Image (cartoon, grey):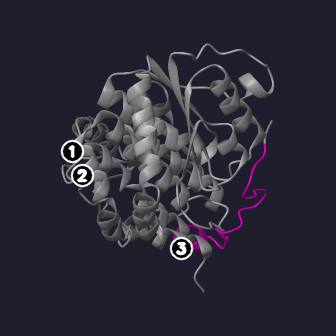
Amino acid sequence: MQTNMRREIDEIPEATARLLDRSSDAIRKAGAALREKNPAFLVTIARGSSDHAALFLKYAIELSTGLPVASLGPSLASIYGAKMQLASAASIAISQSGKSPDIVAMAEAATKAGAVTIALTNTLPSPISDASTHPLDIQAGPELAVAATKSYVNSIVAGLAILAEWTNDGGLRTAVAALPGHFEKAVKLDWHLLADNLGEAESLYMLGRGPALAIASEAALKFKETSGMHAEAYSAAEVLHGPVALVERRFPVIGLAARDAAEDSVVGIVDGLGAKGALAFATSSKLKTAKTLPFVETGHPITDALTLILPFYGFVESWSRSRGLNPDAPVALKKVTETR
């Protein structure tokens, strides 16, 4: 019997095409608002998978514009009542449900502080859309599995489309438009090699750099959510500053490498750990000692990183079932988490 999670993974290409079609006007308006504002910096407001989407967008914005992007702790508004100085800023709030009180409170505070506030949500109307100057429906459609998949991907695609519009980046605009086709290929990739080798492992590292670090963070969370497996995400450089001490023989290390300036760095570190006995994998054809996981090349360094999450989602859904678990309903979790 097919799980909701698997069904929703397979829907990602269609959901992305729907977003780019139906939310095109909102994308243009948000991009125009950012051009008019010409912000000195940006902030993001999110938790969980949405925060990993925000991390992806942080790298994309910083790489494309040179502007710094900072993650705001939602409790600054909801618990501490801090008055943030955001008059020269723009903010991006991401919430699948659009109603987590702390996310809404921080978005509202940013709007009141004078920031151009963009909300990426799967629920319109909603409190987050009311709290923001530019709400955007990510058009993921109903998502029944507790673990977010298509809403995570569509949040990033929406942010990238806005970035392309804001900066008038023709290359990024073309790359975003091509994503549904690339996703069609990526969702069919099989990472059985990883499943065949993990065995009885109970802990692992997910590594990445740049936008791929955000993918590694999301993948580590999904291991915990769906499979009860301890997984930690690190920059492939940061892992050498302490965490590498835990990497013993056959300790699993999965490197998520995109076709970008960081690929050689990620490959070198993963290969090095593999040479020392780690169970090492990466999404690159440049590996020497580690094993290659299939990937799709998009021709753009930013969108290339995003496609890596689709075959991982397919893998982790299957991995969860192989461990006798239900990926649709992880223990102690619920679909909407309302924190204050």
**Magenta-colored segment: predominant secondary structure:** loop
Seen from the viewer's position, the closer of residues 17 and 186 is 17
Q: Position of residue 194 (x, y in %)?
A: 41, 63
Give the residue type that dot 1 points to: Gly
Disc 2, disc 1: CB below 8 Å?
A: yes
Q: Is residue 297 above or below residue 133?
A: below
Question: Who comes first in sequence, dot 3 or dot 2?
Answer: 3
Residue beneath label 3, please? 6
The image quarter containing residue 102 is top right
Q: Position of residue 239 (x, y in %)?
A: 43, 32
Q: Is residue 224 above or below residue 235?
A: below
Q: Secondary structure at mark 1?
A: helix
Give the residue type that dot 2 points to: Thr
Instruction: Tell me if 284 is positioned left or right of 66 in this view.
Output: left
Q: Position of residue 244 (x, y in %)?
A: 45, 33
Task: Please tell me how crowded label 3 is: few (under 14), some (14-19), or many (20+) other residues with Cα within 10 Å.
Answer: some
**Of the numbered discs in the image, which one, if any, rests on residue 136?**
none
Q: Secondary structure at mark 2?
A: helix
Q: Is residue 240 visible?
A: no
Q: Quadrant of the C terminus?
A: top right
Task: Please tell me how crowded label 1 is: few (under 14), some (14-19), or many (20+) other residues with Cα within 10 Å.
Answer: few
Give the residue type that dot 3 points to: Arg
Residue beneath label 1, please? 171
- Range covered by the magenta-colored residues: 318-338
Q: Secondary structure at mark 3?
A: helix
Residue beneath label 2, please? 174
Residue at mark 3 to residue at mark 1: CA–CA distance: 32 Å
Q: Position of residue 127 (x, y in %)?
A: 73, 45
Seen from the viewer's position, the closer of residues 311 and 116 is 116
Q: Is residue 165 visible?
A: yes
Disc 3, disc 1: CB below 8 Å?
A: no
Residue at mark 2 to residue at mark 1: CA–CA distance: 5 Å
